[in-house]
Image: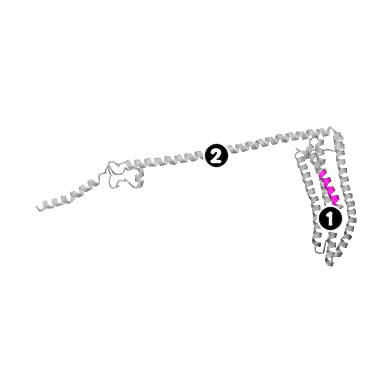
Amino acid sequence: MKHTLILILTLGFILPFSFVSAEDSKVSPHDPVVTPENILKGVGAPSPFIETPDNRGGLGDALRNFVEKRQEGVKKIIDEKKNDMEKLRDEKIHELNNVREKQQQKIEETKKEFRKNVTSVDRARLLIQNNPEIVREFQAKRNELQKEFEKRKEEMHQAIIQKQEEARKTFEERKQELQRNLQKIKDDKKIERAKHIFDQFDIIKNKNIERLRILFTNLDSILQRVRTRAEKASAHGVDISNVFSLIDTAQQGIIDGRALVESEAGKTYSVSISSEETIKSDFEKTRDELKNDIEKIQNNLKSIHEMIKNAVEALAKIPNVNELEIQSTSTITN
């Protein structure tokens, strides 16, 4: 009897726990579905200690499908980037090919122009070699131009000397007139200062006249060399009428500029003194007048320089102009 009672109590204690364990092992149809996304979120994942018929083997397939989809997405991105890189490479190659074609085209055009120019130079040389008369005419023209240049140079020098001698007499008369006007000045230092400044006007003027004379002579010499080179090209049958027109314009500018220099050489400056209080401003007026006259000639000099530059640039545009030489008549005859 005692043993029977103990067995009944033992069964009554164990059976309730068995029913609870069975109920816990059941999966409700309302539980979340097992998917890779829910697994990552930690939702719907079955207990690792409980295995049910619904999730047996399904977890591995879901992960495998998820990994495969991610790999396909990465591969697609890589393929797109690769296609973009290939497209960019093809565009750059196309651009480089276009640049190379243009450069090659320019080189071919330059070669053709060079061959054309060389041929024209050879024809011109042949023309000169077969026509000694052309050489003699050119040499006569060159000698004539040189004589005209030397004549203009000497004429300008003599004209300036004559003008300065005439101006010197007038200067002495103006200086005596200044001394009479300075009698109204009581300050001896101001009188001596005024005389010194008046002498400086004449000295400054004559120094600038000599400087300008040399500059105009140099420009004339340069222009004659340009004209000689143009005459050589003309003797070879090259049309350089535009160059001769620019040379003639520059030559006329030199003639006009020389006239200004000669006129300035014969000019004298005077100072009209009103009073001792205005003596400074009176001398400043004369100083400004001298300064303006010299600047006017200098501006004319600059314009002539630009004219000669235009002639030189026009001559330089003629193909192979520096190769168009003319030999002496004795060399051709031999």
Dividing the picture into quarters, in which one does residue 34 lie? top left
**Quadrant into which the C terminus falls:** top right
Residue 189 position, x and y percent, is 83, 66
Q: Which residue is mark 2?
A: 89
* 122 is higher (above) or lower (below) than 209: above
Q: Is residue 259 magenta?
A: yes
- The answer to whether residue 159 is left or right of residue 97 is right
x 35%, y 41%: residue: 62
* 66 is higher (above) or lower (below) than 185: above
Amino acid carrying label 1: it is Lys
- The answer to whether residue 2 is left or right of residue 172 is left
Q: Can residue 140 be spotted in the picture?
A: yes
Closer to the camera: disc 2 or disc 1? 1
Q: Main secondary structure of the magenta part?
A: helix
Q: Gap in Å between the C-alphas at discs 2 and 1?
A: 74 Å
Q: Nearer the viewer, residue 44 or 218?
A: 218
Q: Which residues are magenta?
A: 252-264
Residue 16 position, x and y percent, is 19, 49
Q: Nearer the viewer, residue 196 or 111?
A: 196
Q: Is residue 48 magenta?
A: no
Q: Can residue 217 be spotted in the picture?
A: no
Q: Which mark is residue 205?
A: 1
Residue 6 position, x and y percent, is 13, 53
Q: Secondary structure at mark 2?
A: helix
Task: State the count of labels.
Answer: 2
